[in-house]
Amino acid sequence: MDAAKRLATLNRIRKLSRLMDTSIRIPGIGFRIGIDPIIGLVPGAGDLISTAFSAYIIFLATRFGIPRQDLTKMIFNVGLEAVVGTVPLVGDLFDAFYKSNIRNLDILEQHLSAVEPKITEAPVYAAARD
């Protein structure tokens, strides 16, 4: 994958992670949630859809040759959120606070800053307009 595609993929991961976990600011208190806990309110299918989005983010992250230990942490984050998310209401509150996709984005960016520092320094969303 060339540098432009790598940057586009990283920006896609950034956008999806933020959409799922921090895209909506709650007025008055400033706490941010994403669509993940909102989707999770749909009985049964909501948690499955959220987990599918999270799995797609992990799939995109594998394109960067992320080490097995980091990949394991990412899968654990999504798995924990998926399991706890099945508990009605409590699981949705957990989703709002745990933010597995943002945690996984941090893991990926730490890996990239060590092996490919220029890509993490590039402007966010610069190459996202394919």
Image (cartoon, grey):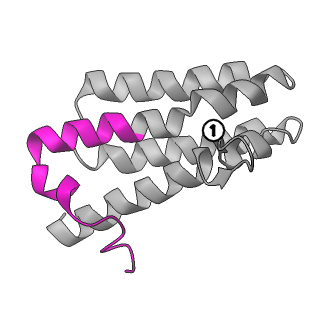
- 7 within the magenta span: no
72 is higher (above) or lower (below) than 127? above
Query: Where residue 83 appears, x then y in whole percent?
Result: 68, 20
Residue occupying the point 59% across, 27% down: 98
Relative horizontal placement of residue 130, taking residue 88 as reference (left or right): left
Q: Residues within 10 Å of mark 1 (few under 14, many from 20)?
A: many
Residue occupying the point 78% across, 38% down: 40
81 is higher (above) or lower (below) than 63? above
Q: Nearer the viewer, residue 68 or 119?
A: 119
Relative horizontal placement of residue 117, taking residue 122 as reference (left or right): left
* Residue type for callout 1: Thr
Query: Where residue 123 appears, x then y in whole percent?
Result: 26, 67
Q: Is residue 2 visible?
A: no
Relative horizontal placement of residue 79, taking residue 130 as reference (left or right): right
Q: Is residue 103 visible?
A: yes
Range of residues picked out in magenta = 105-130
Badge 1 marks a residue whose secondary structure is helix
The residue that label 1 is drawn on is 51
Would you say the magenta stretch is mainly helix, strand or loop? helix
Q: Nearer the viewer, residue 64 or 108?
A: 108
Query: Where residue 56 appears, x then y in whole percent?
Result: 50, 48
